[in-house]
């Protein structure tokens, strides 16, 4: 008797997985969902929409929301860099707390 091998039925990959494999874009970082910020006068609530259901306008709004978040993040990073540099200029060491490094800020000289 011959043994027949049963080949498994291969299911196609989900579309989002196939998009993430596209070599033309940095697609591995595609989000599963897009956050669409509230639009004053049009939509008062933020919307979270699955990427595959999103319109291209939704994608554009999602890009704007991410750009705003990244701007905020970059400002925070720069503020921390500035704080770090100023603390080092003031003589703080790596183990010095921020509170210790700036404890004398705003104190008036006593006569």
Image: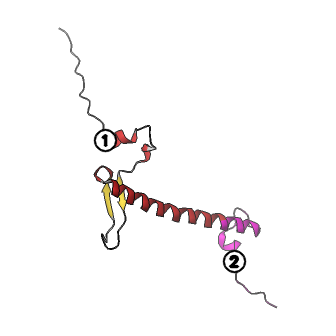
What residue sits 34% from the left and 57% below the top? 57
Q: Determine which residue is flagged by label 1.
A: 15
Q: What crowding class fits label 1: few (fewer than 14 Cα within 10 Å), some (14-19), or many (20 or more)?
A: few
Q: Position of residue 19 (x, y in %)?
A: 36, 41
Q: CA distance from mark 1 to mark 2?
A: 56 Å
| 16 vs 91: above or below | above
Q: Residue furthest bottom?
A: 111
Residue ID for mark 2? 103
> Height in image: 32 above or below 106?
above
**Residue 47 is drawn in which quadrant?**
bottom left
Query: Residue 4 at what x, y percent from top left?
Result: 21, 15
Tell whether position 107 is magenta. yes
Magenta residues? 82-111
Q: Position of residue 37 (x, y in %)?
A: 37, 65
Q: Report the magenta stretch's main SS.
A: loop
Which quarter of the rendering shows the C terminus? bottom right
Regarding mark 2 in the picture, which secondary structure is present there? loop
Residue found at x 52% / y 63%: 71
């Amino acid at each position: 008797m011959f043994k027949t091998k049963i080949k498994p039925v291969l299911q196609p990959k989900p579309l989002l997985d196939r998009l993430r494999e596209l070599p033309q874009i940095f697609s591995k970082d595609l989000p599963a969902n897009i956050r669409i910020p509230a639009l004053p006068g049009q939509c008062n609530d933020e919307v979270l929409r699955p990427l595959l259901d999103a319109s291209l306008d939704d994608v554009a709004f999602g890009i704007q929301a991410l750009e705003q978040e990244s701007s905020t993040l970059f400002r925070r990073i720069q503020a921390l860099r500035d704080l770090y540099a100023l603390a080092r200029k003031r003589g703080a060491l790596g183990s010095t707390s921020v509170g210790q490094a700036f404890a004398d800020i705003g104190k008036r000289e006593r006569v």
